[in-house]
Image (cartoon, helix red, strand yellow):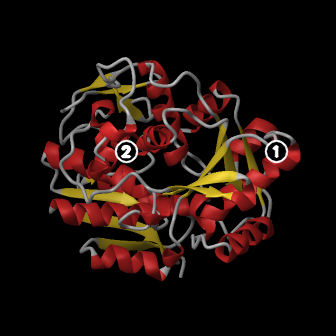
Amino acid sequence: MKTDLICSACNRTYSAGPDEPWRCDCGQPLDFATQPLPDADHPPDFREIDTRDGLWAFEEFLPVRRVVSLGEGFTPLTDADEWNAQFKLDCVFPSGSFKDRGATATLSRAAELGVETVLEDSSGNAGAAIAQYAARAGIDAEIYVPADVKESKLTAIERAGATPVRVEGRRQDVTDACLDCVDAGDGWYASHAWNPAFFAGTMTFALELAAQRDWSVPDAVVSPLGHGTLFLGMYRGFQALFDAGWTDEMPRLLGVQAEGVAPIASELQGDGDTDSDEKNDVADGIQITQPVRSNQIVDAIEKTGGDAIALDAETTQNALDKLHRTGFYVEPTSAVAVAGLSAYRERGTIADDADVVVPLTGSGLKSS
């Protein structure tokens, strides 16, 4: 399934292939030219879904064919009474984070295109996921990471046989170093921020969630927001369900960013000044100063009546401590969304009796 690519900014199209560009000539990110939808105009009974296929049970919605898989998907959806919400436990994926949703789709597409080497830049989770699925596919991988990357994530990359490349400086310096090699022709860019296959994978969060709830969607989903990998993916998934007629509404999508590194919250409401010296270093996984798909993120927020806020380190740490004490052993960045749920309720954005889902995005085993 070699689906062509299109730029949503200028509508230029590109043919699929191992030499396809990683971005449009105009500088904007590319997406798949078509979004598949199922033939059926109503959803199946949950008992008809073979959950052993994991997220690939929804292959009819995906512009990518399953080639590389570790059985990922259908993560648990559990009540979190302490927060009057439901948590979807994407922290239990094979590599320990939701990034496996994107990695299985991205490496499946890489394998189908005959790619021999993939390159990725990451603060840790995406790199670990790409490394693990590249190993499964028999594809070489080089993962560019910050010099101070957490040792547990570096180990996960190395043990999968990928080559980690440590880069000194800011997170953007890591990306720049990786792109220099991509532009030099050293490999195919398996980026969780740029590669459209990654977002095809993360859209399955919405498909699974709706199926687990008997094809109803919550009033709102509160999610961490950095590059928008999960945020945009779930928006596209909920939109696909709505377009297929399988659901009759869209949930509000509410993002939570780290104070001091919050470009979306700052753009929308001046929240989380990006020039502030006070940075939320607890939520290190979402410290993205320039999300490459920021226009698409803002569009998703506006179309769903959503919002984005920024929270400080103390608030995030308090939420993390409570999560651990109540049995949810997640990494720090996961806690920012749970803290955000409380903050949105305090601001009156979410009613106390609203039906809300929060993804727990990464395992605490990866935070050392």
Q: Do labels 1 and 2 touch, CB within 8 Å?
A: no
Q: Residue at x 32, y 50 (%)?
A: 54
Query: Would you say residue 106 is visible in this rendering?
Result: no
- Secondary structure state at the residue bearing disc 1: loop
Q: Is residue 191 left or right of residue 330?
A: left
- Amino acid under label 2? Gly
Label 1 crowd bin: few (<14), some (14–19), many (20+), radius 10 Å: some
Question: Residue 352, labelled with which disc?
Answer: 1
Q: Position of residue 302 (x, y in %)?
A: 67, 27
Q: Position of residue 353 (x, y in %)?
A: 78, 42
Q: Quadrant of residue 133?
A: bottom left
Q: Residue at x 57, y 63 (%)?
A: 285
Label 1 or label 2, whichever comes before in sequence order: 2
Question: Residue 192, labelled with which disc?
Answer: none
In whole angstroms, how far apart are the C-alphas of marks 1 and 2? 32 Å
Label 2 crowd bin: few (<14), some (14–19), many (20+), radius 10 Å: many
- Residue bearing the label numbered 2: 201
Whether residue 187 is situated above or below residue 210 in the rendered picture: below
**Residue at the limit of the structure toward the left, as seen here:** 114
Q: Is residue 62 left or right of residue 112?
A: right
Q: Position of residue 204 (x, y in %)?
A: 41, 42
Q: Quadrant of residue 203?
A: top left
Q: Quadrant of residue 31?
A: top left
- Amino acid under label 1? Asp
Q: Residue at x 27, y 73 (%)?
A: 160
Seen from the viewer's position, the closer of residues 124 and 292 is 124
Seen from the viewer's position, the closer of residues 35 and 258 is 35
Q: Of tags 1 and 2, which is closer to the observer?
A: 1
Query: Would you say residue 126 is visible in this rendering?
Result: yes
Q: Position of residue 310 (x, y in %)?
A: 75, 52
- Secondary structure state at the residue bearing disc 2: helix
